[in-house]
Every structure is written in C-alpha cells, then in structure tokens.
C-alpha cells in the first residue's frame, strides 16, 4: 500500500488555491456564506504577487470626475480588450467594482485622499477618466494587507508554503486536491466538494518578466489536467515598462503610475516617439501599443544604451515624485543607482500578465468541471485581448467574491465530498516522486532557463508563423526533457525538486500559448502577428478554447454569444467629456 493512503485527509467545504487578492476575497466570501474554508498558498500569507500591482485599482466611483460611471468603464474595458472580452464579465466588473472599494474601506483600506478629503483617483492608459483608486505606487500591497486582516478575522484554515499538484475527482466531480509541504516534503491530501483556483499567472514561462517566482502556471496546468478548458491563451501582455539595467533586475516592473503622473518616453535621439504611434494618447495609450512602440524603437536602432527607451519624470518636483512614486524612487536608487528625481529610467517591455486562463462562467466563476472554480489572473474572459492597467485589482475582488459565494453555495448543497479514489492518490504521489528516481535525468533549472529563452525569442511581443512553428518543434524537445528532470538528496528544503515539478507545468502551458497563437491568424491586442498584421472581423466573434482530450492538446474556436441590444447601445454612446 502507498504511504499516501495512510494520511488522514484535511477536510473543508471549500478549498482556495492561492492567497493573492482573488484567493483571499473568495475565501472571505465563502466563509461569510457559511462554508468552512481552507486556503493553500505556495508562499507565505501576505507574499502574493498581487503586491506587485502598484499603480491603482480601477472603479468608476466618480470621486474625481463626476462624468465617470459604469457604462464608460465598461466601454473602456471592451475597447481596450479589442472587443474579444466576455461582455457579461465586463458588465459585472464595471457595475460591481465601486461596491468592492466601499467594502475594502470598511475593512480598513486607507486610500489616498485629495485636499477635500475625497478618494484620489489617477488615470491610466485606455481609461477615459481619472478612475484608479490608489495608495501611492503601493496599491496592491494595501489590498493584500486589508484582505489578509479580514481573512484572518474570518478564522480560515491556512496552509502556507504548500504546492498543489493534482485536482482529485470522483465520478467526474471535484472531491479534493493533492500536494506537498515545500519545507519538509510531506505529502498532503485535502478533501472538499469545491475548489477555487486563484493561483495567478504564467509569467515565469518567459525569461524577462515582472512576475514573482510563484508564477509557474500551476493552477492552469492542474485545471487542464483535470478536464477544465483554457481560453485565449495566445494573449500574453508585455507591460511596456520593465527595468533594463542592471541585468540582475531586468524585467522588474516600472509601474504605469510613472506615466500616469506625467512621465515621458523618449528614444536615444531625444524624440518623444509616442507622437508617431498614438499622437492623441501618447504615453497613456494602451499597454499593447506602448509595448510594441518601445520594441520597434529599439529594433530600429533608436534604443537606450542598455537596449530600452528612456522614461523620465524628472521634470516634476522632487517632493511630488517621492510622494506619488515612493517605491519607484527607492527601487531605482537601490538597484540601478539612478535618482529618478534627476535622471531618466531605462525601460523595456516585460512579460506581465496573461489575459487567457481557465474558462469560467461569468456569473459564478464555475468551470466545466463540477465543483471547480477559478478567479483572478488564473481565469479568462474579462480582459479580452488586452488588459487595461488598474482593471486587474478590481477584477480580483469582483470575481473573487463571486467565486467564493458560488463555491460555498455549491459545496453546502452537496452531500459531504466522497473520499478520493486511492488510485488517484497513488498516481499523485508517484508523479511527485518521479524526479528522485531519475539519477541521470536533466537539471530542471537548465530546462526551465531554455524554455524561458525560447518563449521570449519565438513567442514574444511580435510573432510569425515561422517563429511559432519553430517554438512548437523546440517545445517537443523541452517537454521530453522536462519529463526527465531529476532531483537529488532528500525532500527537505529541496529547491531542485520544486523546480522539477514546476517546469513540467510550465511546458504544458507553454504549449497552449503556442498552439493558440498559431490558430489566431490576425493581430489583436497583445497578440501581434507580423505575417497577419490586420484585425479580422470574423475572428472578433470567437475565442480560442484549449482542452486536453485523451492526452492530446486540442485548440478550437468557440463563438461568443451576441452582445445584448442594451449593451450594444452603451458601446455606441459617446461621452460628452474628453480624457482628463
């Protein structure tokens, strides 16, 4: 008998995988609905990647500009997403974000205020009005602080520094999950009728990224293996401004708040080059446009000394910069020895966010697998082909709440979850132990590095069919190598073991990105095909959907429901005002 079968599973009504903004908000709502809730997080509580969302949270509360409302926010989100969005999710998000701001304030969030005592809001690219509620350039940190305090007060069970490796099913329904404790290497089994995947993004698949170490596509991979569908995986957002130098911090985020507060982009010739690419919105164009513009300037020989562009806020008073952008001031002083109150920053696009993810129902965040839910960056639909800055944080709380409520209702309506099948637990244990059985296997860190470089080179800001086919061929070799990654020593504190399991997830999800990008023969939002530069009216109607059937990855197009007449009217409306 396998050792794993001797473990008594931990039981609850709802399991939340991930303790970022979406996971914490889901857990809070599920607990408030009467469910017992367990949170499992790969890192420590409070260390989620959400804290890297610095610039603000988009919500049409109209505190600074009374012309703003949910209809304008909905219109901006759809326009920014190049109309590939799940329109119902965009509607719910725009309508419900203001109420989430109120909830956060009741729970202790301290947002920046203007001289009159009202909530301060700033503008980001693609937003018509000043819409982003902010805490300097540390908004994500404040969100996590607030939600963590509320979650702790909700008396949830938390397993920190644990990795989930498999969703357990019985008769086609969720009955729990399997994983291990990262510190000691102990195997774990958790039993529950409902699981919410809120594990974040996939950015570590690329070599240059703003994502923290946890972003290895774990949630997407285990959901795919459990039978869930992924959607729109071709749409990977490259944030226009990541640090370029020194090499050790290449890709670290330079918040859009720098441009929101008046930052100007120039090339090596001193030209404000955004005048060529978007003369109306300039630096506050949408992220896909600014990223492509910087990439083009560098590719055509007008880049900065370290292969980027110059971003300067130094024309603003020093005290203004230190007040509005304290983290950026400290970040550049510490890492690059650059005083941004006096000198320009060097920036270049960095892998930042995936618009695609687990396909969910807009109302409930439910997947096609009974008992499985997803929210936050792990899910897809709201952002379409390109996410607007600031929409991620409000996405987390709006759909985190919906996922938590729906999962709790589902779990409480079920009989207690059935016991996981012993064969599944044995299989999960075997998969976790495989790296130790391969004495002459591959070094997982080398495979991971080769994957990251390949994705950056062939599936980056600009793509061609030839590049994508080359990526597909290279991935076949990487998948075989990943299956042979080894780990030496014991299971205690074993980073090599963790990396071996991570890279297997990474190559699986890299395949969904490549295949979806090959299928979409157009340029739209964050997906730029040099060989198909135009936008297709026909492809605007469909989303790519990926499934694993009988061990084979399949990608197909699924047509979206037509936009209701009342929302079509909202999209056609014109604002009386202009961007502020």
Image: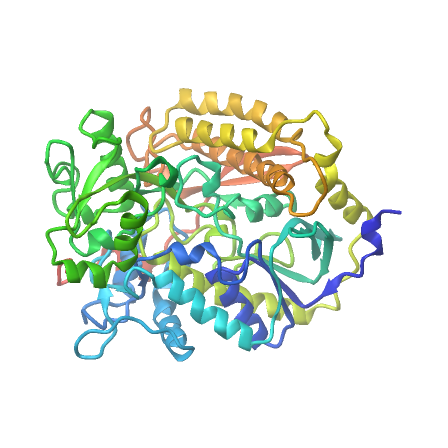
Q: Quadrant of residue 296?
A: top left
Give whichever of 146, 440 is nearer the camera: 440
Left or right: 189 as drawn, with respect to 545 = right
Residue 553 in view of the camera: yes
Across and down, in percent, residue 426 comes to 80, 45
Residue 312 position (above or below residue 316): above
Left or right: 62 as drawn, with respect to 186 = left
For the point 65% across and 52% down, which residue is it?
Answer: 183
Residue 357 position (above or below residue 349): below
Give whichever of 149, 362 is nearer the camera: 149
Across and down, in percent, residue 187 comes to 73, 52
Left or right: 309 as drawn, with respect to 515 = left
Give whichever of 524, 508 is nearer the camera: 508
Across and down, in percent, residue 125 comes to 24, 52
Quadrant, the C terminus: bottom left
For the point 31% across and 42% down, which residue is it?
Answer: 243
Left or right: 371 as drawn, with respect to 366 = right
Q: How was this image coloured? A: rainbow
Q: Which residue of the protein is positioned furthest toward the right in this rendering?
A: 1
Give whichever of 58, 498 is nearer the camera: 498
Residue 88 in view of the camera: no
Residue 298 position (above or below residue 195): above
* Number of numbered discs visible in the structure rendering: 0
For the point 64% across and 37% down, which residue is it?
Answer: 549
Across and down, in percent, residue 420 comes to 78, 55
């Amino acid at each position: 008998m396998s050792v794993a079968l001797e473990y008594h599973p931990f039981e609850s009504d709802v399991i939340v995988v991930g303790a970022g903004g979406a996971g914490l908000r889901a857990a809070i709502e599920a607990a408030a609905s009467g469910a017992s809730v367990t949170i499992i997080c790969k890192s420590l509580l409070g260390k989620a990647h959400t804290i890297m969302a610095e610039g603000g949270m988009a919500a049409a509360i109209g505190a600074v500009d009374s012309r703003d409302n949910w209809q304008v926010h909905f219109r901006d989100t759809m326009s920014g997403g190049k109309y590939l969005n799940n329109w119902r999710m965009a509607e719910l998000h725009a309508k419900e974000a203001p109420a989430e701001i109120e909830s956060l304030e009741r729970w202790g969030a301290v947002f920046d205020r203007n001289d009159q005592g009202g909530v301060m809001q700033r503008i980001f690219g693609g937003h018509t009005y000043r819409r982003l509620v902010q805490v300097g350039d540390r908004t994500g940190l404040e969100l996590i602080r607030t939600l963590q305090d509320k979650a702790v007060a909700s008396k949830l069970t938390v397993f920190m520094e644990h990795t989930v490796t498999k969703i357990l099913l019985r008769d086609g329904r969720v009955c729990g999950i399997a994983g291990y404790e990262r510190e000691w290497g102990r195997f774990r089994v958790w039993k529950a009728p409902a699981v919410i995947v809120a594990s974040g993004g996939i950015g570590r698949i690329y070599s240059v990224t703003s994502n923290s170490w946890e972003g290895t596509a774990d949630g997407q991979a285990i959901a795919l293996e459990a039978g869930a569908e992924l959607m729109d995986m071709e749409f990977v957002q490259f944030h226009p401004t990541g640090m370029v130098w020194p090499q050790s911090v290449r890709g670290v985020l330079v918040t859009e708040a720098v441009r929101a507060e008046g930052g100007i982009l120039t090339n090596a010739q001193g030209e404000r080059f955004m005048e060529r690419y978007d003369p109306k919105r300039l630096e506050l164009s949408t992220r896909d446009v600014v990223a492509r513009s910087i990439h083009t300037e560098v590719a055509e020989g007008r880049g900065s000394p370290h292969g980027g562009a110059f971003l300067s806020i130094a024309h603003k008073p020093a005290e203004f910069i230190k007040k509005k952008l304290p983290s950026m001031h400290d970040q550049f002083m510490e890492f690059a020895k650059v005083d941004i109150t006096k000198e320009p920053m060097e920036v270049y696009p960095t892998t930042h966010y995936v618009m695609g993810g687990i396909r969910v129902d807009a109302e409930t965040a439910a997947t096609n697998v009974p008992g499985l839910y997803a929210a936050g960056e792990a899910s897809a639909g709201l952002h379409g082909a390109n996410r607007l800055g600031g929409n991620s944080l409000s996405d987390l709380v709006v759909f985190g709440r919906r996922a938590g409520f729906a999962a709790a209702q589902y779990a409480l309506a079920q009989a207690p979850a059935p016991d996981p099948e012993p064969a599944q637990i044995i299989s999960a244990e075997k998969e976790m132990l495989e790296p130790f059985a391969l004495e002459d296997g591959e070094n997982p860190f080398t495979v991971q590095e080769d994957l990251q470089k390949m994705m950056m080179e062939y599936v980056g800001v600009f793509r061609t069919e030839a590049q994508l086919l080359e990526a597909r061929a290279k991935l076949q070799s990487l998948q075989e190598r990943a299956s042979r990654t080894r780990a030496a020593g014991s299971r205690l504190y074993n980073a090599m073991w963790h990396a071996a399991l991570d890279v297997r997830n990474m190559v699986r999800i890299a395949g969904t990105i490549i295949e979806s990008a090959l299928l979409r023969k157009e340029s739209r939002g964050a997906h730029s095909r040099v060989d198909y530069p135009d936008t297709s009216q026909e492809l605007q109607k469909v989303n790519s959907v990926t499934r694993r059937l009988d061990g084979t990855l399949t990608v197909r197009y699924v047509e979206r429901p037509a936009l209701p007449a009342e929302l079509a009217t909202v999209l056609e409306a014109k604002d009386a005002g202009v961007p502020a």
